[in-house]
Image: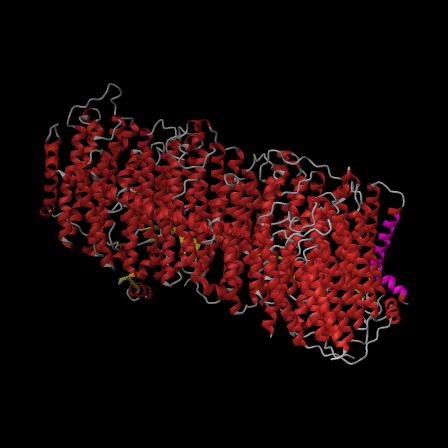
């Protein structure tokens, strides 16, 4: 029972706890904050797993991007701090049951499958990632890179068109 | 390396996945639903990284997949939020139950 | 020389990119009148369609992330035809739309996504293609910016597709965990019918089923179809569905070959369920788009039967049917979009006595519906016949009987519309509509397709010769 | 001669109609086209005899085989034997009569005649096709025009009837489809599955497959020819349809079913036919008796004829089910005869209805005085349908009885006797209808200024009655025409249960 | 036998007449139609007489026996190598005699109708129908093939339908026509099935072959038909009885006689032709035609005998109570045919046993003349009085002397008073019966008495009784064309008895030696005279005796007057039983059960789709939930299945 293990359990407990809170708290703003914590916890998990690059990306994009976006949208659509509508009780009970069952089912399968970890050391250097990202050979990711760029472009245009207040509706 | 078995990490990811799903099912505010989706995606990310690290360290497929997922999550969130805002303009509410006119 | 065959192999994708950039440049440049822009765009799309047919090549790039061959080229061409037709049909709607070029940019980027998805040899590329073809689509669904229904539809689309892609990703991650690779060719050998594999596989199937709206993953379909602008609806129902179907077939036949028994049974269940659900809901609909949504769900059920044939005949029949389905469905949607653009009517009850005022449109609509219903001599008959024959090859006659009898139900609701067009009396039927030449041309192309593709056996022969066996 | 003409001429006619303007052009074109078909049919008959007398004893004549969907071994394969020729003649008769009888169809005339001709094309195609796919194709081609014809130009609860008819017929063809696919996948000709009728008939389908798929095929086609209990589309459909459509329905499309039962079900799956003959005979006997009894209670002329058609088509199925040379011959003769006779009957009813605007027997009466010609036609049709010697009905029914009686099983004998008994019931309802509708005193004062038949109606009567009488007086021509075909079928059905 | 080929003309000439008159008569030569028809018929009558002469006296006889000649035979519809319907003509004493009778009487009727039907606006149609009937009747008697006979049988039926319904505007006429057709049709069903049975076992439809096979106890066919049995009765009996039922229907034997009286609604000459002389004896003809086979089966003959006898008696009784003169004649016809039937029934084959057969044919022959004479006379009367009812008549003798005389002759003939025609034939019948069956003999005797009584009741009430009170107009008895036939037939009725039928038409073709036995024939004559005297006493002058007797008889008289309620029974059976208990339920079942189920299926689908619409609730989260459950369900299911 070394420190690494303890750290892991702490991190994971933190992730799950904050995650649970994020989907259950009554106040939307708090939910956003809990989400933020949860994401950071996950970043911490990445650090723990020694994939620093992903951790960094996680923090930059999620924490720095998405959560901020979400909070903006909350400001746009909501008066902060007000209580959210309670979920429909029947459905929440049912979905709680379903989710628990699903979780049991899935994890049972995973557990039974029993992934045996190999022993090769795993050291993803940022440089390696960069070179592979732009290589055109086997395990090169130039094409997905291009595709994602188009996706982002399209998404941007879409957002602009949709979210732009158009004059007709105003006057 | 530390002696955490892979299944424990997978436990975390799966749990997170279903937590997200629970949120998705129950939350009535669209934005919170979006948050739940983010949780789901993150659990998948954990899966990929964990698999990549523990099982197939020889190449970085999982890691790259994670990167792309994160990017896409961003794009998706952006578009979703744009749509939600537009919907808010017309419905003056972001409650899913409100936006149920198309049915049967 | 890698660069050379890069240009040759990816010519269709590059063509699309080119058009997208042209549109961007036009957008930033001085703004033109919509008409001229539309003509230009349709010309470009036509070029794009033509370019698809020249220099067919076979090969793969980037370590099997992108592969192409005659069949894939054909599939892309089919999609190109569909897109061209849709853009011609939505002329009247787009003519006075503010965000014309954005619409096209989004549409073409989704098309690009589908192309990547079709030629993907790698789960990552497949996923990216899928998302690229989904996210902008949900933006497009919102293009009737003032309509409440439109934004609701868009919301439903984006949220449920996010959900489904989440599950899909979970499945992919499991597959990755099991096989340790994302490359189709490397995955296949590792697939066995173990519990976790089955679970992962079902997750993937669900991802596909969501896109092609197979029950019980279809619920978004009707609402989104009803809410979105007609152009987007037809795009959803024809192009994106067709594209995913193409991928579905190839993935099942090649990637998941080891699990054939499994997915055969799954398809059996799903197809029966889908046909039943589609028919039962379609009977009752009054909104034309919603009606077409459910009818298309039923159609997908028939397609699944064809796929379950799991043979060269299966592939050929599916592609053939999709081709026919594009023409027939666009024939119907073309009329609907014209009517809704010019009069705003979208209900079937508005079509009472339609024949009195608009005989031409009525005939087009009727023939298209007959083709959907599978009535000879329209092409739909041949499509359905071959699908069912392909399914029957497995010797599962229960499935065939159920399907055949369900065709009768589907006849009921198609004929219901024909009835209200021709027979029901209406004190104030719709006014005589003036139709611009471009949609008219599109409609005629649809008609020609409906008539020719069926009767002219060579087309099927060609597709069959290209399609890969099981 | 080239059989494709039989499809080409109607197609061209239909297209020509689309380019016509006004009722006059349209109907002239239609008449021209149908007259051409008429001539062509007789030309075909002539050539057929020529070939036969020239000693060409191949089963099918004038074959034309074109590979349509090569990968599935689907061919556009056409050809005729005596039975098909008889059916084609029947079609030609009914078509020209139908065109003539709807001479004054002024609402949407272009569409009307287009659909009429289109329908006839379907019928021709069905009768000449030797490839099951082609056959099925034309079978369904012939369904939808009926829906439109009834729904648009019909009377009474037309939408309901049209929908019912279309759906039940489509249900029938769905079953047929299952049967055909079963046949297809159980054939192995040179390593290929085949839809080719002639080849399949050479190849004996395995017994279990036959037992499985015969019911599908037979019931499917049976629905078309009003097999009990799937006959309920007949009364509604016929009574709501416009005159010409009724003539087509009863005259031709019910025959599609009988022909299919014979040519596909019985011919390709003979062993199963033997296995199931008991059930077939039971059902057809029920149809005969019960159709006749139900007819007695009808008050609407069209309903009367529709129900009597159920009864008469029961004879067809009975003849097929008895599986003796004579009875099958009789079945085919009955198809032809019933086609002409019922077409005539509907034509007469249509003429009466178009004048008196009622079809209720109770409201009609004394028409003999004001419209002797039409009344005479009506009575002749009635007499033919109750099987009067000298008309086709007698010959056909007697042939069926003779053939059925050759089947020594006592139950089959009983069925035959019951079938014979139905001719008495037929007499009852026909005479009731004729007696109170045509004879008797004039019931309604405004009948007295009605006019008698116009030239086109007279022509209709002459054509159809001509056919009926020729068959009735010189039946041996028809019989010799179809006998080789039926012999072929009976040889298929293996055991020689022929007349001694 | 090519020299006979001209007999094809005998039936075909009337057919041609029918076609011409039927198609063009009404429009082009409505007036002259009568002449044309009559001339055409004259031709065939002449030809048949010529045939008779040639057959009987020139070359019919070979070594003392009349042989069957088949001059014409064409295969019409070949079912199988040996079962085929042939069309042709047979010549044997039976058919030749019938030829003469039919064509001759028909000719008379044609001539009579010239006057009687004058001025009808469907004059041509009338003659067309007459020609059609004559054609079918001639074809019937010439048939060489049991199926040919069936066909003409049907044609005769339909032409009688048309002729009875000639006054189609009279509902009664239409009803009568329908009744006649349907009843005979019902009987024909028996005939048809009989044909099927006989032909199946005899393996032929041809009369000659059939008879030769079924009368030769060694032939396999004979064995098969006698061994095969149903309810313990041999197929032979079944076949013959069923065939006889067909004959009984046409010949109005009990219980299928109900149509005959009503058929009197038709024009009177038609009654004279169809319902007196020709069609109604078709049944007798049929039995006679198959007589060689009947002889082999006593059960069948037994049926024939008793049905015949009973009908004779019943008809006679009913006839006494009727007041409509045509109905009286109708019943008397029925009664006389009963005579012929049981005469056949008691007969044997060959030699002295064959007496019955000969007598029956003889009676048929004579009866044709006097009965048609009676009808035509009645027609003349009705033509004058415009009524069918005795009450409106009386004392007509001074207005219509010729009619009176001929009518009297006919009555005497039918009453069997020597030397009139009826005497000889009836005497032979009684003789034959006396040898064979005493019971039937008594019935016959009594009946002959009754016959004399009601005939003279008729005669007196028409021509004597009260003074005629004719309103001033025309007192002539019709045109010359009406008188001539009366005279001709009258002379026939007088002389026909002397025609040597016994040497011509016999059961075995050989000559049959007959001798009038005075002592024996005294009884029937006495009975006849007794009947006449009774009638004289009661009806010569107007008085109330008949009424008294009627009162004494009471119920019986009423029953007889009401024809023993047989019509009512039939009415009950058809209307109540068939229509209400079978037809209506069938129609109801079809409408509500069979069709109902199909409609219910459609409705059920709609209902289901209405029920399940809730799952498409419009709530995106619910959709996601279904999505998820679908996945879990599928994977759980298949993991369970595959592992």
Residue lying at the far bottom in this picture: please name it: A119
Left or right? Give the position of C206 relative to D229: right
Q: Residue furthest front?
A: A81
Q: Of residues D320 and E46, which is closer to you in this image? A: D320
* Viewer-side residue, E77 vs D283: D283
What range of the chain is rendered magenta? C3-26
Q: How is the image coloured?
A: secondary structure
* Relative image position of residue D130 (x, y in whole percent): 59, 58
Residue D131 seen = no
Q: Residue reaching furthest left?
A: E519
Q: Is residue E630 magenta?
A: no
Q: Is residue D8 left or right of residue B78?
A: left
Q: Is residue D211 left or right of residue C297?
A: left
Location of residue E73 in the rendering, given as x and y in whole percent from the top left corner: 40, 52
Image coordinates of residue B78 in percent, x first then y, are: 78, 54
Picture quadrant where residue A2 is located: bottom right
> C185 or E93, which is in the foreground?
C185
Residue B74 placement (x, y as % from top left)? 79, 58
- State which quadrant residue E32 falls in: top left
In the rendered view, tell whether residue A83 sits above or below residue E42.
Answer: below
Residue C7: in magenta span: yes
Q: Residue at x 33, y 45 (%)?
A: E580
């Amino acid at each position: 029972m070394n420190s690494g293990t303890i750290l892991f359990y702490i991190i994971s407990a933190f992730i799950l706890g904050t995650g649970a809170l994020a989907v259950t708290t009554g106040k939307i703003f708090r939910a956003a904050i809990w989400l933020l914590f949860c994401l950071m916890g996950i970043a911490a998990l990445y650090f723990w797993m020694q994939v620093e690059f992903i951790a960094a990306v996680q923090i930059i994009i999620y924490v720095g991007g998405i959560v901020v976006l979400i909070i903006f949208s909350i400001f746009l659509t909501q008066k902060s701090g007000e209580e959210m509508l309670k979920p429909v009780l029947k459905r929440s009970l049912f979905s709680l049951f379903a989710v628990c069952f699903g979780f049991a089912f899935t994890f049972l399968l995973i557990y039974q499958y029993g992934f045996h970890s190999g022993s090769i050391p795993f050291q993803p250097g940022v440089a390696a990632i960069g070179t592979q990202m732009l290589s055109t050979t086997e395990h090169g990711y130039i094409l997905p890179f291009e595709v994602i760029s188009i996706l982002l472009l399209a998404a941007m245009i879409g957002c602009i068109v949709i979210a732009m207040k158009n004059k007709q509706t105003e006057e | 390396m530390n002696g955490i078995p892979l299944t424990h990490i997978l436990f975390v990811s799966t749990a997170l996945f279903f937590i997200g799903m629970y949120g998705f099912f129950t939350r009535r505010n669209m934005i919170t639903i979006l948050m739940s989706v983010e949780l789901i995606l993150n659990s998948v990310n954990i899966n990929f990284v964990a698999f990549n690290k523990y099982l197939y360290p020889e190449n970085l497929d999982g890691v790259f997949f994670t990167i792309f997922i994160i990017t896409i999550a961003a794009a998706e969130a952006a578009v979703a939020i744009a749509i939600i805002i537009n919907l808010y303009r017309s419905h003056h509410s972001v409650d899913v139950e409100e936006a149920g006119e198309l049915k049967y | 020389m890698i660069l050379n065959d890069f240009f040759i192999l990816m010519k269709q994708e590059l063509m699309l990119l080119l058009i997208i950039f042209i549109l961007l440049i036009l957008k930033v440049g001085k703004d033109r009148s919509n008409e001229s822009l539309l003509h230009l765009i349709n010309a470009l799309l036509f070029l794009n369609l033509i370019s698809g047919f020249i220099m067919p090549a076979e090969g793969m790039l980037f370590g099997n992330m992108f592969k192409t061959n005659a069949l894939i080229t054909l599939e892309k061409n089919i999609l190109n035809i569909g897109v061209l037709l849709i853009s011609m049909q939505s002329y009247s709607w787009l003519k006075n739309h503010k965000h014309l070029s954005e619409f096209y940019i989004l549409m073409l980027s989704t098309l690009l996504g589908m192309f990547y998805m079709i030629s993907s040899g790698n789960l990552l590329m497949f996923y990216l293609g899928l998302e690229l073809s989904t996210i902008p689509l949900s933006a497009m669904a919102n293009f009737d910016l003032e309509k409440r229904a439109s934004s609701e539809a868009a919301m439903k689309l984006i949220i449920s597709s996010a959900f489904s892609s989440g599950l899909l990703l979970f499945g992919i991650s499991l597959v990755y965990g099991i096989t340790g690779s994302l490359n189709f060719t490397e995955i296949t050998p590792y697939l066995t019918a173990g519990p976790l594999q089955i679970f992962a596989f079902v997750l993937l199937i669900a991802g596909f089923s969501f896109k092609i709206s197979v029950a019980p993953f279809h619920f978004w379909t009707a609402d989104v179809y009803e809410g979105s602008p007609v152009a987007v609806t037809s795009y959803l129902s024809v192009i994106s569905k067709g594209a995913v179907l193409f991928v579905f077939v190839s993935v099942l036949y090649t990637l998941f070959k080891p699990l054939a028994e499994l997915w055969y049974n799954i398809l059996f269940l799903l197809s029966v369920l889908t046909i039943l659900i589609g028919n039962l809901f379609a009977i009752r609909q009054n909104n034309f788009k919603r009606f077409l949504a459910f009818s298309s769900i039923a159609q997908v059920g028939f397609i699944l039967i064809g796929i379950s044939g799991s043979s060269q005949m299966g592939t050929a029949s599916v592609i053939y049917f999709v081709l026919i389905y594009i023409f027939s469905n666009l024939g119907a949607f073309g009329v609907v979009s014209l009517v809704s653009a010019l009069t705003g009517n979208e209900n079937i009850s508005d079509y009472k006595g339609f024949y009195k005022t608009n005989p031409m449109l009525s005939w087009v609509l009727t023939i298209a519906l007959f083709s959907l219903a599978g009535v000879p001599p329209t092409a739909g008959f041949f499509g359905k016949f071959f699908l069912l024959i392909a399914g029957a090859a497995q010797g599962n006659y229960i499935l065939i009987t159920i399907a055949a009898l369900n065709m009768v139900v589907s006849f009921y609701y198609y004929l219901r519309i024909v009835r209200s067009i021709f027979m029901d009396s209406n004190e104030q039927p719709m006014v005589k509509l003036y139709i611009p030449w471009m949609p008219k041309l599109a409609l005629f192309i649809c008609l020609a397709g409906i008539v020719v593709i069926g009767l002219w056996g060579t087309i099927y022969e060609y597709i069959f010769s290209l399609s890969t066996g099981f | 001669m080239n059989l494709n003409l039989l499809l080409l001429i109607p197609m061209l006619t239909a297209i020509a109609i689309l380019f016509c303007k006004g009722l006059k052009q349209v109907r002239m074109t239609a008449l021209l086209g149908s007259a051409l078909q008429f001539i062509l049919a007789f030309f075909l008959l002539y050539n057929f005899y020529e070939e036969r007398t020239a000693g060409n004893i191949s089963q099918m004549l004038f074959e034309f085989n074109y590979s349509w969907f090569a990968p599935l071994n689907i061919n556009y394969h056409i050809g005729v034997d005596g039975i098909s020729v008889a059916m084609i003649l029947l079609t030609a008769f009914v078509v020209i009569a139908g065109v003539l009888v709807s001479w004054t169809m002024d609402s949407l005339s272009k569409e009307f005649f287009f659909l009429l001709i289109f329908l006839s094309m379907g019928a021709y195609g069905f009768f000449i096709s030797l490839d099951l796919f082609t056959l099925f194709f034309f079978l369904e081609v012939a369904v939808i025009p009926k829906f439109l014809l009834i729904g648009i130009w019909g009377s009474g609860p037309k939408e309901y009837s049209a929908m019912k008819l279309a759906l039940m017929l489509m249900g029938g063809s769905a079953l047929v489809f299952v049967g055909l696919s079963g046949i297809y996948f159980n054939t192995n000709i040179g390593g290929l599955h085949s839809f080719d009728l002639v080849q399949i008939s050479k190849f004996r389908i395995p017994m279990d497959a036959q037992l499985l798929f015969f019911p599908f095929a037979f019931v499917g086609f049976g629905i078309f020819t009003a097999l009990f209990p799937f006959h309920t589309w007949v009364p509604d459909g016929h009574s709501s349809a416009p005159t010409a459509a009724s003539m087509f329905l009863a005259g031709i499309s019910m025959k599609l079913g009988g022909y299919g039962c014979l040519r596909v079900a019985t011919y390709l799956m003979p062993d199963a036919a033997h296995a199931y003959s008991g059930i077939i005979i039971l059902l057809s006997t029920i149809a005969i008796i019960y159709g006749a009894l139900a007819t007695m209670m009808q008050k609407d002329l069209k309903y009367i004829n529709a129900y009597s058609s159920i009864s008469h088509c029961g004879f067809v199925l009975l003849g097929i089910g008895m599986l003796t040379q004579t009875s099958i011959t009789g079945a085919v003769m009955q198809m032809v005869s019933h086609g002409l006779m019922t077409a005539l009957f509907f034509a007469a009813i249509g003429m009466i209805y178009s004048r008196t605007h009622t079809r209720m027997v109770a409201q009609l009466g004394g028409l003999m005085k004001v419209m002797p010609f039409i009344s005479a036609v009506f009575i002749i049709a009635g007499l033919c349908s109750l099987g009067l010697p000298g008309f086709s009905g007698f010959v056909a029914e007697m042939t069926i009885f003779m053939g059925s009686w050759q089947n020594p099983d006592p139950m089959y004998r009983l069925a035959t006797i019951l079938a014979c008994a139905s001719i008495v019931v037929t007499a009852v309802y026909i005479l009731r209808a004729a007696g109170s509708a045509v004879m008797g005193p004039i019931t309604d004062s405004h009948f007295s200024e009605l006019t008698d038949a116009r030239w086109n109606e007279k022509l209709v009567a002459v054509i159809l009655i001509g056919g009926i009488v020729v068959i009735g007086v010189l039946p041996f021509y028809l019989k010799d025409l179809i006998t080789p075909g039926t012999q072929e079928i009976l040889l298929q059905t293996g055991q020689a249960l022929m007349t001694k | 036998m090519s020299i006979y080929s001209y007999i094809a003309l005998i039936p075909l000439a009337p057919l041609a007449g029918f076609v011409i008159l039927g198609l063009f008569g009404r429009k082009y030569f409505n007036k002259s139609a009568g002449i044309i028809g009559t001339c055409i018929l004259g031709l065939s009558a002449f030809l048949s007489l010529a045939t008779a002469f040639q057959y009987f006296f020139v070359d019919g006889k070979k070594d003392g026996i009349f042989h069957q000649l088949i001059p014409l035979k064409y295969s019409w519809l070949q079912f199988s190598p040996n079962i085929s319907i042939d069309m042709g003509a047979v010549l044997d004493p039976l058919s030749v005699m019938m030829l003469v009778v039919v064509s001759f009487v028909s000719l008379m009727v044609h001539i009579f109708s010239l006057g009687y039907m004058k001025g009808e606006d469907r004059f041509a149609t009338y003659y067309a129908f007459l020609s059609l009937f004559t054609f079918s009747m001639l074809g019937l008697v010439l048939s060489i093939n049991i199926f040919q006979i069936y066909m003409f049988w049907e044609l005769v039926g339909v032409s009688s339908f048309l002729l009875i319904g000639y006054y189609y505007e009279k509902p009664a006429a239409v009803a009568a026509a329908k009744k006649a057709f349907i009843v005979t049709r019902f009987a024909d069903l028996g005939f048809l099935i009989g044909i099927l049975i006989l032909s199946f076992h005899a393996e032929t439809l041809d009369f000659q072959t059939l008879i030769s096979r079924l009368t030769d106890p060694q032939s396999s066919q004979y064995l098969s038909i006698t061994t095969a049995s149903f309810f313990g009765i041999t197929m032979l009996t079944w076949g013959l009885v069923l065939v006889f039922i067909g004959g009984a229907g046409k010949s109005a034997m009990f219980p299928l006689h109900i149509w005959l009286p009503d058929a009197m609604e038709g024009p009177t000459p038609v009654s004279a032709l169809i319902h007196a002389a020709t069609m109604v004896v078709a049944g007798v003809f049929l039995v006679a035609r198959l007589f060689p086979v009947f002889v082999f089966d006593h059960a069948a003959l037994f049926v024939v005998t008793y049905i015949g006898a009973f009908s004779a008696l019943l008809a006679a009784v009913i006839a006494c109570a009727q007041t409509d003169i045509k109905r009286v004649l109708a019943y008397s016809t029925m009664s006389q045919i009963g005579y012929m039937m049981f005469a056949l029934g008691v007969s044997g084959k060959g030699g002295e046993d064959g007496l019955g057969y000969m007598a029956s044919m003889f009676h048929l022959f004579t009866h044709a003349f006097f009965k048609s004479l009676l009808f035509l006379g009645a027609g003349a009367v009705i033509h004058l009085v415009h009524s069918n009812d005795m009450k409106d008549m009386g004392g007509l003798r001074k207005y219509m002397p010729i009619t009176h005389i001929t009518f009297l002759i006919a009555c005497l003939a039918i009453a069997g008073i020597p030397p009139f025609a009826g005497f000889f034939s009836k005497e032979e019948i009684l003789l034959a019966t006396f040898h064979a069956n005493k019971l039937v003999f008594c019935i016959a005797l009594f009946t002959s008495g009754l016959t004399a009584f009601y005939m003279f009741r008729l005669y007196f009430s028409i021509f004597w009784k009260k003074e005629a009170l004719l309103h001033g107009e025309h007192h002539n008895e019709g045109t010359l064309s009406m008188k001539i036939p009366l005279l001709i037939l009258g002379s026939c009725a007088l002389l026909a008895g002397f025609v040597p039928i016994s040497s011509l038409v016999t059961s075995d073709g050989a000559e049959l030696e007959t001798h009038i036995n005075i002592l024996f024939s005294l009884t029937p004559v006495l009975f006849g005279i007794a009947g006449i005297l009774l009638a004289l006493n009661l009806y010569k002058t107007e008085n109330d005796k008949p009424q008294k007797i009627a009162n004494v008889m009471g119920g019986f008289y009423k029953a007889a007057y009401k024809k023993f309620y047989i019509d009512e029974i039939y009415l009950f059976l058809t209307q109540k039983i068939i229509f209400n208990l079978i037809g209506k339920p069938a129609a109801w079942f079809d409408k509500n059960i069979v069709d109902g189920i199909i409609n219910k299926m459609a409705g059920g689908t709609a209902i289901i789709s209405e029920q399940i619409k809730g799952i498409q609730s419009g709530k995106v989260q619910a959709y996601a939930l279904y999505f998820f459950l679908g996945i879990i369900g599928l994977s759980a299911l298949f993991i369970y299945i595959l592992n």
